[in-house]
Amino acid sequence: MATLSLDGVDVMGERLADEVLDVIQEKPNLSKISFVAHSVGGLVARYAIGKLYRPPKEEVKDDISGNGCKEEPRATIGGLEAINFITVATPHLGSRGNKQVPFLFGVTAFEKAASYVIHWIFRRTGRHLFLTDDDVEKPPLQPPLLKRMLEDYEECYFMSALHLFKRRVLYANVGYDHIVGWRTSSIRRESELPKWGESLNEKYPHIVYEEHCKACDSEQYETISTEDDGSSDKLVSWVAHPKSVTLEEELVRGLSRVSWEKVDVSFHNSRLRFAAHSVIQVKDEFMHTEGADVIQHLIDHFHT
């Protein structure tokens, strides 16, 4: 059982989708669905909802309220209304790139070496995380899985499913997470990482920054690139030379086509700060409730 998490994001996503469908079948009274996922589980959940997405049915139901309107058909996740999609310390941009895996200390040589050997340890899951699966899949060659998950790909409606949720939330460690870096877990560029200070909220002492990011599509990039305000050089370069865009930048732009609530967390004053990757989602007596306020924040803002 311990090795099942090495089978790849896609295989785990298929398993999760099947499990969700089993639960739905066992509980026919369910009407809504939400996902809360930690670490690579967030990628697995994104894959699973792509499999669980059900397009709107073509027929339009008559409105029984008597107001003369008709009820428009809606897409669903496994036949249920999609409410919350929440990830905690998930590497949405993968683990390849400078400081995306902090325990490699940002040393370029270490990071490059890791991308070549990671599959020896973490097998297909490692290839998916380090975006090196494009050269090993069966012909025809396909882009890395995380890039494929930026679109509705074949029978998986990855982005349609993600867009369907009423809320999408990212919880990210600003530091001391030695497994998942701040950029990749918060879907930000380096220049977008906010300056944060001590939390002033006694109820959530480890929540140090929150922001709501609106959806931004590719047309907005092109519009911004035509503005001569001295701050659009990157976007001008992208329009003129699309091949110069890094894979990480593609992932940021692709995932930014939907809105996100971003919640930044810091355990820098905690004695368990070096276990931040786990503490952020743990609330029990063994961890002395270090992450309890983060979980409470998640619960308090959970839509039902």
Image (cartoon, rainbow, N blue to C red):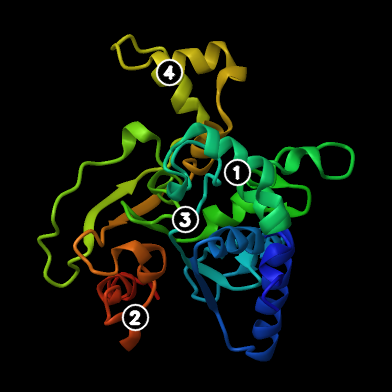
Q: Is residue 77 left or right of residue 119?
A: left
Classify mark 2: helix, strand or loop: loop
Which residue is tagged 1?
114
**Distance from label 1 to label 2 (Cα)?**
32 Å
Which residue is tagged 4?
234
Q: Residues within 10 Å of mark 3 (few under 14, many from 20)?
A: many
Image depth: mark 4 or mark 3 in front: 3
- Position of 12 relative to 188 (above/below): below
**Distance from label 4 to label 1 (Cα)?**
28 Å
The earlier-in-sequence mark between 4 and 2 is: 4
Residue at (70, 86) in percent of width and height? 25
Q: Is residue 167 left or right of residue 248?
A: left
Amino acid tagged 1? Ala
Q: Quadrant of residue 114?
A: top right
Classify mark 4: helix, strand or loop: helix
Image depth: mark 4 or mark 1 in front: 1
Task: State the count of labels.
Answer: 4
Amino acid tagged 4? Lys
Residue at (37, 56) in percent of width and height? 172
Taking depth in this image into account, of 118 and 87 the one nearest to the observer is 118
**Distance from label 4 to label 2 (Cα)?**
42 Å
The spot of residue 16 in percent (x, y) is 67, 72
The spot of residue 138 in percent (x, y) is 88, 44
Q: Is residue 149 left or right of residue 172?
A: right
Residue at (50, 61) in percent of width and height? 165
The earlier-in-sequence mark between 2 and 3 is: 3
Which residue is tagged 3?
179
Q: Is residue 206 left or right of residue 24?
A: left
The earlier-in-sequence mark between 1 and 2 is: 1
